[in-house]
Image (cartoon, rainbow, N blue to C red):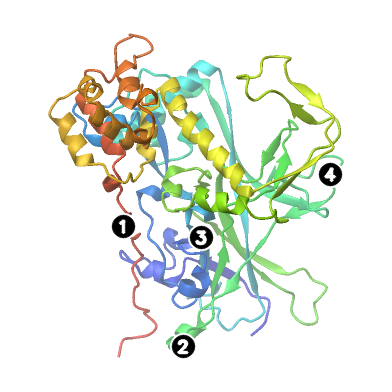
Amino acid sequence: MSGHDDFVLRAPWYVRERQPAFGLRDRRALRPQIQMYDNAQFVKNRLLPDPRDSLKATQDDFWSYPVPNTPSLSAKGRERLATSRLLHTKLRKLYQPTHERFYAVVVEVFCDAPGLPRAGSHTDIEVRMVMRRQHTSVTGQRKPVRRLARNLLVEMAKAEDVSFDADQEPDADIRDVWWADAAWHRRFEEDNAELLAEVGGHTDAQAWMVDGAGSGQWRTLGTPPAKGRSPDTEEEFPMWRLPPRGEDCAEARTRSLWFGIIPTFSGAHWADEDKKVQPKLDDHGIYELQCFVRQPAPRGKEQCPPKICWGEPSEPFRLAAPFDPDGTKNHAVSITLPDLRQLAARAGQPQGPGGARMITPPQSQFVFNPFNGIPKSGTGKIGAGGGICTFAFELFFMVAFFLFLMFLPIVIFAFQLWWMLALRFCIPPSISFSLMATFFAQGKLLAAVEADAQLSLKFDAAFGTDSAVLESADQSPGWAKQLDDVKAPVSGAKIFSNDAALTGAMVAANDPADAVKPAPPPVETKPDDPLCPSP
């Protein structure tokens, strides 16, 4: 079918049928649907076989902000180490592909005529989408901006029944918090009218505009390019029509369902109005998708422009940072360290062509004595260079991992970031974590660990250091001694020395048995198709 018709876009039928169901004229039906998956092959394996089949958003799929938290002395296990708590908003968060999360937007097309007839008979249309961002500019003195950010966090904490140290100046960028959740804005505005009067804010919808050379920039909708910039157009993303399934009834085959892949990462950068280079997509921007129908002019009127019918924007969302812990927990990477025995055997064979060839340009060689401690200022020299050295890849990894093992405790102790120990665990050949947990649960202190040589070795092993293989002179000081000596930076009081519960929490955090495999993510319901009555 062809003809220059008008079209409207709605949420797909199965979204409208999920309980509580709503009709085509409902405001909720105007937005396209963002669907989430946990496999890169989701189009082939889930979306095409059954568009209803997708993951359901949980609390982790909404943007959160960390606030300071002083763990209670009665807190158990890992909770004793958590110096921050998360406050959640109603703003969606989309994760990166490296987080094992993938997203599609789905929309259904109808003819804009009485009754909104299904547009399945139209073969002359294409559906595409654009990605826009909401750019917020905040003006005002630093003091009222920070006070307003603090009050915002207090309100959010009350809503979630989370307590935090509100006397600390918040780290929050006011744009991050204020524009994340509009549900309670009206009441908050009334309570903070004076502060808001001192802080100005304005939000613009921006489009990603690309010129003929492929250079892009975010620009407020409707504004022309800056002087000297080539003509550009808004970047569009393709959408594809979902083909009818074999089990669809005749009525269901008249639907016009379309999907597109949501980009959650881009390597593109651009220079803003201050000439600062910025990434196209980041974890601070608020984005939304807008789909549209493009229909070419009918036969005989090819010189006329195509008809374009825009739909409503999707729900707004932010993008997770690459190292968002709620995302990285979904992706495991296993690395087997180089086998020293195999490398030693390989060393007795002729050198092969493989490895990393390091070519040193002339006058670019670092020369220093590696056996004389850390080189002092001016003791190193620049050598003639010009040589080529080949190193086995394994050497780089072995040295890098050695440095990591050496510097991890230094970072933890220097900055007193004890919670970092809860982000790793080792599986020693033999150690009873339950025995250690019972030891500290009985109120015994680190001094008792230091007094028992065998127990001290087991304590080291709990933190990934196999001190038993070292000479006795090199086994001390171990983890017990180091923790026993730690003092608070301001008061000077010892942190672990008299706190058996906190020390026990540190040990428990390293217990492999404490690791819990996440439950399978919940899936959306699959309502029956109202066009296809059950037999």
Q: Amino acid at mark 1?
A: Ala
Q: Amino acid at mark 4?
A: Arg
Furthest-top residue in view? 491
Rendered residue at 47%/21% (across/down) = 146
Instruction: From the image, state whether disc 4 or disc 1 is nearer to you.
Output: 1
Ranked by sequence position, the earlier of labels 2 and 3 is: 3
Count of marks overlaid on the render = 4
**Distance of label 3 from label 4 (alpha carbons):** 33 Å
Is 417 situated above or below 497?
below
**Disc assigned to residue 229:** 4
Q: Is residue 162 visible?
A: no
**Distance of label 3 from label 1 (alpha carbons):** 20 Å
Ranked by sequence position, the earlier of labels 3 and 1 is: 3
Instruction: From the image, state whether disc 3 or disc 4 is nearer to you.
Output: 3
Ranked by sequence position, the earlier of labels 4 and 1 is: 4
User: Position of 321 compared to 24: left or right?
Assistant: right
User: Position of 56 compared to 108: left or right?
Assistant: left
Estimate how packed mark 1 is, as few (under 14), some (14 to 19) or many (20 or more) residues with alpha carbons within 10 Å: few
Dot 2: what SS?
A: loop
Rendered residue at 46%/40% (across/down) = 180
The residue identified by callout 2 is: 246
Residue 154 position in % (x across, y down): 35, 27
**Disc assigned to residue 103:** 3
